[in-house]
Amino acid sequence: MVRLVAVRVLIVLTSNDRRGAEVEGSQLCDELRRAGLDAAVVALRGGARQPIDVAALGARPLAPRVLRELRRRAAGVDVVVAFGSSALPACALALVGSRTPFVYRSIGDPARWVRGRAHRWRTGLLFRRAVHVVALWPAASDVIGELYGVPAARRSCIPNARPQTVVSTDDERGAARAGFDVPAGAPVVAWVGSFSSEKRPVAAVEAVAATPDSWLLMAGEGPLETDVRAACERLLPGRHRLVGVVSPLEPVWAAADAVLLTSSTEGMPGVLIEAALHGVPAVAVLVGAVAEVVSDGVTGRVLPADASPAQLAAALADVHAHHADFGSAAREHAGAFTWPAVAPQWVDLLTKWGKPGP
């Protein structure tokens, strides 16, 4: 009698930083385990100030010692998931000559990261080393095929996902606002992310400053923190709260009436999914897969990537005016981005490529 064994999966993250892709990959591991797969997750590098609970293999993703350890661990599984950009070359190098296949999870917008012909050629070699490439949305998959020569049969789309949740009660909303020292009746705009150039946090300050009576609640940290604080003091005196890294984000969503995304580049922003699942509508610029997550005029507002602060402010005012309708529609739409909807797609894919022994 042959005893069937669960497919063994190793998910490889770039780092154990508490960032969207790392959180996503860690949650995927948990969901695969719940579905009966034998899943584990590791990070190529550590050193995060506020890490997620994932062990790191070293300090540099492509260090020889890290690659050797990755190869050793991969030898004990049926399929590896290279989750994110640095995980692609690491798995491609570590698994040369190995019998363990790897699937690459593209976490961003592939059209934004082409750096010339040589870079495109090298990246194409890495993409084609994977047995399968998983994009976030159909347009991204098409770009991967066009730029890097990955045939359609070796590409698919699986969206980002977040756990199901419930809308905050009035008591929870009041407690969250009191905790952040925000007036109970003020319109509150949440902005969540790294204070870095690609997230454009100062643009968020400028937009909320142009929205009368609104407060800005900013959760995050990063190299532009000094600039953000200066902009808040200059443009939003008395109408802002910089609360640092908040984990989990439930108090932020409980306190917020809208979420604002101002990034110059994104994949499929997890913060928009989380906000929608809490019934918080969005104002977001059109980058990456934003249009997949936010339906303009239905679950929030989607503006051109170069939208001015005045345009963002007008969209925020519209969302505040239709908060209840937009929020309800956002929560319903976000059901497609929950783990009960998304995890089975991963299970089907990895079961196909994993080859467990008897």
Image: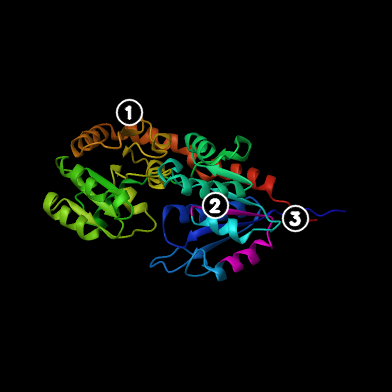
Q: Earlier in the sequence, mark 3 or mark 2?
A: 3
Secondary-structure class at tag 3: loop
Q: Which residue is mark 3?
A: 5
Residue type, numbered disc 3: Val
- Residue at the image position 68 percent from the left and 62 percent from the top: 75
Q: Nearer the viewer, residue 330 or 23?
A: 23
Residue 307 horizontal/vertical position (percent): 25, 36
Q: Give me the disc on residue 163.
A: none
> Is there CB contact under 8 Å for labels 3 and 1?
no
Residue 65 occupies quadrant: bottom right
Looking at the rendering, in which quadrant would you find the C terminus? bottom right
Q: Which residue is mark 1?
A: 297
Query: Crowding near pointer 3: few (<14 within 10 Å), some, many (20+)?
Result: few
Q: Amino acid at mark 1?
A: Gly
Check residue 70 for magenta coloring.
yes
Start-end of magenta stretch? 67-85
- Crowding around mark 2 (Cα neighbors within 10 Å: few <14, some 14 to 19, many 20+) is many
